[in-house]
């Protein structure tokens, strides 16, 4: 199983999702490939936002080694599932899709918990630590569901 998370800058939400899912897989001894990417180039090659690193660290997740990268069409070849945070990412990812197979790979991450509701994980960039905390708990809930589904297979 190869899973990709996408957000806008690849420095807050998707690196946290990646770190959380990787830790859950490790704890369950499941071998999966996890990565993350973004759509905006402002932060390419940057480490995650300090607030995201700090929030992860609070829960034992170290995302400091991640470096931001852009999403591209080749990611549809590399990954089985591609999870987005909000409707803008969803539309963007769909625009990169080559065919129906690719389109089927894309879903909102929170649909793992609330199927079909397309609930966003909102951008915490302009907000304080409380927003990062909220994002962390949303992502943790979603990743818990994802890992239990993967574990059943
Ligand atoms: P992310 O947060 O998409 O969760 O990584 C953002 C980071 C940077 C920007 C927007 C969102 N930005 O506009 O630079």
Image (spheres, helix red, strand yellow):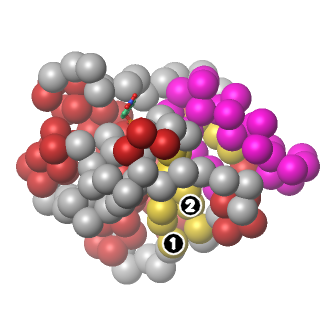
Q: Quadrant of residue 11?
A: top left
* SS for dot 1: strand
Q: Residue at x 80, y 51 (%)?
A: 102
Q: Is residue 131 left or right of residue 143?
A: left
Q: Quadrant for ligand 1?
A: top left
Give the quadrant of the C terminus.
bottom right
Q: State the extent of the magenta-drawn residues as a range.
A: 80-103
Q: Which mark is residue 99?
A: none
Residue depicted at x 33% and y 74%: 26
Q: Which mark is residue 3?
A: 2
Q: Please tell me whether residue 119 belongs to the stretch shown in magenta.
A: no
> Residue 135's spot in the image, x, y percent?
30, 32
Q: What residue is at 27 percent from the left and 39 percent from the top? A: 136
Mark found first going from the N terminus, 1 or 2: 2
Is there CB contact under 8 Å for labels 1 and 2? yes
Residue 33: mark: 1
Q: Nearer the viewer, residue 98 or 41?
A: 41
Residue 64 in the image, given as x and y percentages of width and height: 21, 60
Residue behind label 2 places its C-beta within 8 angstroms of ligand 1:
no
| Helix, strand or loop for disc 2 | strand
């Amino acid at each position: 199983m190869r899973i990709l998370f996408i957000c806008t800058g690849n420095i807050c939400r998707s690196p946290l999702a990646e770190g959380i899912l990787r830790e859950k897989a490790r704890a369950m001894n499941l071998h999966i490939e996890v990565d993350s990417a973004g759509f905006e180039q402002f932060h390419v090659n940057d480490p995650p936002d300090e607030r995201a690193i700090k929030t992860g660290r609070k829960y034992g997740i170290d995302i400091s080694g991640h470096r931001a990268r852009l999403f591209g069409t080749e990611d549809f070849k590399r990954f089985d599932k591609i999870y987005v945070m909000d409707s803008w990412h969803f539309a963007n990812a769909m625009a990169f899709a080559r065919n129906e197979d690719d389109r089927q790979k894309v879903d909102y991450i929170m649909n793992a918990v609330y199927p079909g509701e397309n609930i966003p994980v909102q951008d915490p960039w302009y907000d304080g630590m409380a927003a990062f905390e909220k994002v962390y708990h949303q992502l943790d809930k979603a990743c818990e569901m994802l890992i239990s589904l993967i574990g059943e297979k």
